[in-house]
Every structure is written in structure tokens, then in C-alpha cells.
Amino acid sequence: MRRSRGLAAALTLALAGTCTAMGLGLVEEAAAITPPVAFTADELPTWQANGVVWALAEAGDQVFVGGTFSAVRPPDGAAGTEQEAVNFATLDAATGAPTSCKLSFTVGSGTATVRALVLSPDKATLYAGGYFGAVNGTAVSSLAAIDVATCTVKTDFRPAFAATVRALAVTGDTVYAGGDFLTVAGQPRERFAAVSAADGALKPFTANADEPGRAVEVTPDGSHVVLGGDFFTVGGTNSHALAVVDATSGAVTKAYPGFIETNSVVKDIATDATGFYTGNEGTGGGVFDGRIALNLSDFGQRWRDTCLGATQAVLPYQDVLYSASHAHDCSGIGEFPDGQRHHLLAQPTTATGKLGWAPDTNDGIGEGIGPRVMAVGSKGGVQYLWVGGEFTTVNGAAQQSLTRFASTGDTGAPSVPVASAVSFKPGEVQVRWRTSLDLDDSTLTYKVYRNGSATPIATVAADSLFFRRPQASWTDTTVTAGQSYTYRVTATDAAGNASALSATASVTVPNSADGYPNAVRTDGAQLFWRYDESALPFVADSSDGNQSGVHLNAPALRQTPGAVSGASTAIGFNGTDTQVYGDRRQNVGSTYSIETWFKTNTTTGGKLIGFGNNQARGSSQYDKHIYMTNDGRLVYGVYSGGTHTVTTAAAYNDNQWHHVVATQGPGGMTLYVDGAQKGTLGFTAHENFAGYWHVGGDSLGGWPDRPVSEYWAGQLDETAVYPTVLSAAQVQNHHTLASAPADSVVEVQAAEDTYANAGAPSTNYGTSGSLAVRGTSFYASYLRFNLPAAPAGTVLKSATLSVKTSTMSGAGTTDTVSVLPVTGSWTEAGTTYANRPALGAPALGSFAGVPEGSAVQTTGLDKATVAGALGSAYSMALSSAGTDALWLWSSEAAANEGSPKLTLTFGAP
């Protein structure tokens, strides 16, 4: 297992691998996915059936497919025509295309189906069970033996099963069957039986069950048979859904009364060298739908995975248990809550925790179950995990009933990170992103690029799963106050597949600490949502806790004005279905503080913030919350055997910004509004459950003064959660700092720019996409900015100039480039070398050389000079005394590529 590494700057990782395309041929070798997973999540082109696949088996580079279908067809978009295939097909393990072996399973009346396929130990004989009366016209009775080499029915194997055979297992001399039958060859054999592998003669083995058998598996030593199904008794012994019996007599060796819920059944059983595993399905409430691992040594339970979602198949392979289900709630084992269905999962054979492998199907046709059966085939040294069922899509693409995944050739790149950047004090920028999704790699490498450079400034490793994508972050401590920076992030998997770069995240470093957010961070917030995002669906955490959030149903972004002074924005909720929920499942102790700002005129109330056990669905456990009543009063509540609340006397639905803080600790519960204490309660207990923070809505059933709406209609801002009790002084300080003057940043693009060239003294370059600077032979670039006046009550605190080198070879320079005032007149359209304007002194700033590679370069400018020109047009020039040319993008560059820009920071005097 790859060791998980912490987040650290400049962590150098050597990544190797190839990106291999997969077609209908053999798959080339490629770098491995995250161990111990053995297969990629990239589906391979595979012929598909027009019905349901119930059974799979593999031998001699072939995969045998059984089910209820009449034809197979090529993958969507591939060449070829549909072929008749009556409930059976044989496909090449490596290409996924049909082989020459063709068998038709039919019945005189009713619907024929193949429900079970199993190979003899030497893989020379294929046994097929189901409901059918003939194979290629040869009479059989729901169980047939096929010679693999000749693809013909073995006519000397003639058992007679009176009803459907649903499960098969085989040893060297015996075939064990389970199903709906009550007799075999005219003899009583209720739901389980054994026949000779050679001729189908009935054996003495008797394990009569009162309800259908659905799974049969022989232990590796051949001495026992594990039975699964709907039954409540086996051989007269109470044992629901699961039993271990003697392989010769069928006598019960191990019974499991009360072990599996009465409304659940066993759908599949598989073994490895150490144990056996069950896949379970339930109906109704309080069911068991997950997986159980049991030891071979004593047939006792090793672990139980209580995920809900009807497990249909289990397959242990190289110490990993792969499963097919529609798992939708794994909260019982500390994983994802009730919500989206996930159809293919992997976990160690030793534990319940899910691994980083999660390709997916839809529910599909029939019962809407999705995948139903799994098998491993191999060819040319490559292993293939085959999956069959009733699905009609795989990983979002059209594909019916059959798919497969290879042990090599990982081609799927991680999803693109969604990055943002913030700076609350001089010398520090927090770059953060929600970790990416990769369906077969749980450990990804993230590269952080600054100012458009092609060389990463930091490399960070972080773990993520499809249901656990924590925020990752990196702090840049090499930034200069007053200067602007841009950041982009990319994700790479173990095979070297890289995502595209994230969208650009821009930030200006303040000249002094930003009072409100700096105080929230200093006071220890472990979740701090500022709601400054410009795009859905992720909310960044501005604390060091890396607890990002997820927008649900598109709340309104960047609402202004926000609750605190400065450029930060708020978020708007519709009171119907919008909210933000946390990415991280956690337990919250009895000591904490929750804080947010709110603004509303609602008369239907709603939950502002709270803790609940679900994410996108309403929670069934919920407390530690603040909600508003219909008449605008605030309620802070905690649950522990009953509801315990503190309620304000006054209403706050006046459409003004208000600040609310709720704390609980050894001293009990306290509620503050607008910096003042509004109520206390000496209650210190709480409900201890794992869950997620919710903002804007969640369940409120059973709480006093319950509002009409559980969802918030209004705006929220600056939500924070602390693992400590904020003091009254800290609460008051936060309220005061919200209205303190804050720096404001104005970015000004060049209104005009051009350059002069001594080699072409009469040529004007005003429409060129480039600017150039050199001392000999002479180039100089001229920039004009229309400067704004300082906002009322503020002064200029800093001014910086940003330019970006072009992508041409040698665009950088080793020479110092000075930023000089322009004293003469000029125009973009009319300036040439011959009539270029005069330059003044002293220099406003300088670049001490510019490295190669297209990247943004920034220098500070003389504040007093720029301040004196505020409210007017101001010109400056880039000049050098050296011989190494610098090439930059101009404002005319395609897509406004890095055009020259001034960043002006204004603040209180």
C-alpha cells in the first residue's frame, strides 16, 4: 500500500508512466494504479448484450457469458453488426469481441435463461445452470455440461433439475447446485443438490432448505460447502440465509441463526485462501445489504460492511474484495451518507474501508440493480475484470450489460482541481483546492504554478476517494506585500496522467493584516467559509483545517455588499432547497463555537447553520444548530435525549447584517448576537454522532418553534467553526472588526502600449501583440494608465506593475529593466523610434533580470510618484542598458494574454 504523505511545499516526487490508448486489441503495459487495487477504472470497448447478464466464467482466453438476452452487438461507435446470441455468448478476454463458440439455450415454454456458469478445475468443462430445456437443440434439464475445446454439449451428462438452477460450484468429481428446485432426477432435493461431474448422477449430498438457494461455494480444501439464499432452515437446522455444510453428506457444520437480518438474503459467496465472503440484499427497513467476511479457520465473522444497496456479487482477487451493488449509504462504517448510488467498489479482504477504485454504471433495466456478476479473465499476461448485469451505461457512456477493466493501461486523468487563493496578511498567500477525483488512484500529486511559470513552485501529495475529497492547500511565504500573484494547480496520478491546469486564481498581498479574517484565523477557526467563490460548486476553507464545502442546488454567489468591510462577498439562499454542506465527515465534541453573519427579511424562518449526519439529503440526526423562527427570533439548540435551546427575545429579520455566535463548553451554552450575550443555558451534554456541517438548511423536525421552512431565505457570510469556546471579548472583537476600514485593491489595465525599435525607426508597433526592451540595439516599451482617484478617506498604500513574458524562445533577459517616467508626449498609434518621447528620472522601479519561460513578473513602483498622478493619465516606460532583449505581451495580445497591469492598494491613512 502506498504510504500517504502529508501536505508540504516543494515535495519532489518522481513520476513515471505512460498514457496508453486502449482499443479492441491487447492492452500495453503502463504504470500501476494505486496499490493494492489491481485494475484500472477505464472501461474497455466490449461487445454488449441486449438483455441482462447473470453469469460469467473464464477459460482459455475466453469469457463465457450467460443471461437473458437474444443478441450481442459491438460497442457503441465500433464497427461490426449485431449477432444472434440466445442467452449465451463467448467473448475474447483481450478484445471483448465474440469468438467462434456459439451456443443457444432454449426452452419449450416460458423464458429461458442462464443464471450460473462455472468451470471444472482443469477448465476443460463448462457447467451452465438456469432455466432451459435444450442447448443447440440437445435436450437438457436446467443444468448442462459443455466441452470447452469443441464448444459442444456433453450428452453423457444428463442430470434432471425440475426448476431453475441459480448457483453452481464444482470440484474434480462433483457439481453442487442451488436454486428453486425441489427434486432432482425424481428424488427429493430441496433447493440444494450435488451431482457427479462426469455424468450428472445424483449424489447422496442432502441439504434441504425451506426457501430458494442463490449461492454455492466449496471451501478451498474441498471438505465443506457454503450455502447462501433466502432460507431460514437447512437440514432442519435454524440458519437464515447462510450455512456451512459437509461436502459429502450435506449435514450442517455451522449454522447462522440470527446472524443475518430476517429481511435480508445472501446473493453471492466467494472464497479465497483465508476466508469466504458474502454479498447480501435486503428488502424493507432495517435490512442488511452489504458484505461479510468470514474466516475459514472457524467460519466466524472477520468483518461486516453495513453499506446499504443490495450487494449482488463479491470477488476476492489479490487481497482485494471487489463488489457489485448499488451502495448508497455507507455511513454505518464511517463512509458516505445516504445519497448517490455507487455500483462498483473495492476494499481490502481484511477490512471494510473502501479503496480508490470506483468505476460506475447506472441501475439499468429489469429490477434496476446495475451490475450483478464479476469474473477475472486473462490473456497475454494482462488480467481483465469482467462485469455483467442490467446496466446500460458505464462511466457515463452507453454500454449495456457487459464491461471490463484491465490490470494495465491506466489512461484516465484526474479531474481538474478547482483552486483559489487568499492573503490575509503581508508575506503569505494560502493556495487551496478541492482534491481531485481519480477513479483508480487515491493518492495524487498536485503541482502549483505561480504567475504563469512552466515550472511548479510547489509539489504536494494528497489522498482522496470518490466520497472523501478533502481540501488541500499550500502556503506561499515568498510573496511581497502590495504585489499581485496568480496561481494554477494540476493533478497527476501514478501513471503520469495529468489533469488540465485549474482556472487562474488571482490574489493581491495586503500591506497590513486584514483585520476580520486574520482574527478568525488567529482565534483558531478550523472551518472558515467566506463565500468569495465566483463559480459553483465548491466553497473554499480559509482556515488551516482544510474543510471545504459543496454548494447544493446552486445558491447565489458573490452577493454584495458582504457582512464585513472590504472586497469579500456573501452567499444567497432561496429558502427552498439551496444549502452548503461540508466535505468532511467528523465528530464534534461538547466544546465548540459556531459563528456566522446573516441578513434576511424572511417570515418563514429556516436553519442558518447546523450539524447533521447526511449531506445532500435531509439529516436524521441533527443538532448544534442555529435557526430562525417565523417571527425572526434566533434559536440555538443542542440535542441529548431531548432538545435544549437558547432563544432570543428580539427579532432579527430586518434585512440588516447581524452577527451570531453560539458556544458550548464546560460552562454550558451561550448565544451572542451583534457582539452581545443574549442568553445562556447550563447544559453541557450533546449528541455524539458523525456528520457534516450544513449552512442554509437541514432538518428541524421535533425542535421547538419550528419554522415553516427548514431552509434559509436570505444571505449568509463569514461562517466559522472553532474547536474551542470563544470568549465574550473575542466575540465582541469580531463584531467590531467587521466594520473596521479595510484595504481595497484596484487593478488598472494599460490603456495604450507600444514599443520603439531602432532597427525600424519609422515603424509603429501600436497594434503588435508584443512589447520589447533592449539597450543595444535600442528597444523601449511605453505604457499609459488611466489612474483612478483614491477612494474617499483612503490613501495609496502601494503600487505594483505586472508584465508577462511572451512564449518566444529567449523572451527573458539577464539585464536589469528599469521602469521610468515618460516626460514627452506619445500615442499608441503614432509613436516610432524616430519620434519617441523623452524619459525622465529617477526610476519608479526595476526588474533585476527576468527568467526564461512565459510568466508574470511584478515590481513595486515608487508610491509617492504614483500617488501624485492619481486621477489622471500617467505614462511610464520600460528601458534597459544591456544587449539581452526582453519580450512581453502587450494589451493587443490574443485573449488579453498577460497585458501590462497596475495594482493599486488603497487604505486608511
Image (cartoon, grey):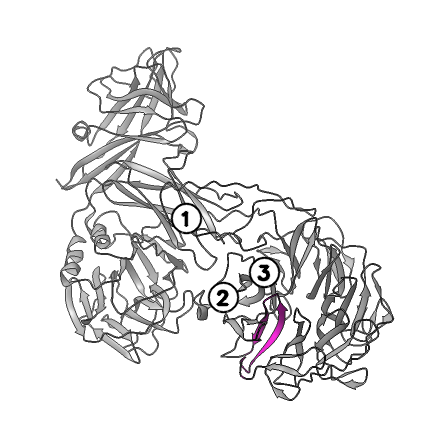
- Disc 2: which residue: 352
Q: Which residue is mark 1?
A: 418
Q: Is residue 728 left or right of residue 880?
A: left
User: Magenta region: which residues?
Assistant: 258-283
The three-letter amino acid code for the residue at tag 3 is Thr
Label whose residue precedes the other's in the sequence (2 or 1)? 2
Residue indicated by mark 3: 361
**Image vertical order of residue 182 relative to residue 793, above or below:** below
Q: Type of residue at label 2?
A: Thr
For the stretch drawn in magenta, the main secondary structure is strand
**Can you say whether 898 is above or below 519 in the image?**
above
Q: Is residue 135 left or right of residue 37?
A: right
| Kind of residue at badge 1 | Val
Left or right of 62: which side holds 802? left
Classify mark 2: helix, strand or loop. Answer: loop
| Earlier sequence position, callout 2 versus callout 3 | 2
Which residue is pictured at 67% across the width and 70% down the height? 221
Circles 2 and 3, Cβ within 8 Å, touching? The answer is: no
From the top left corner, tell me how far across and down residue 616 is, in percent.
42, 65
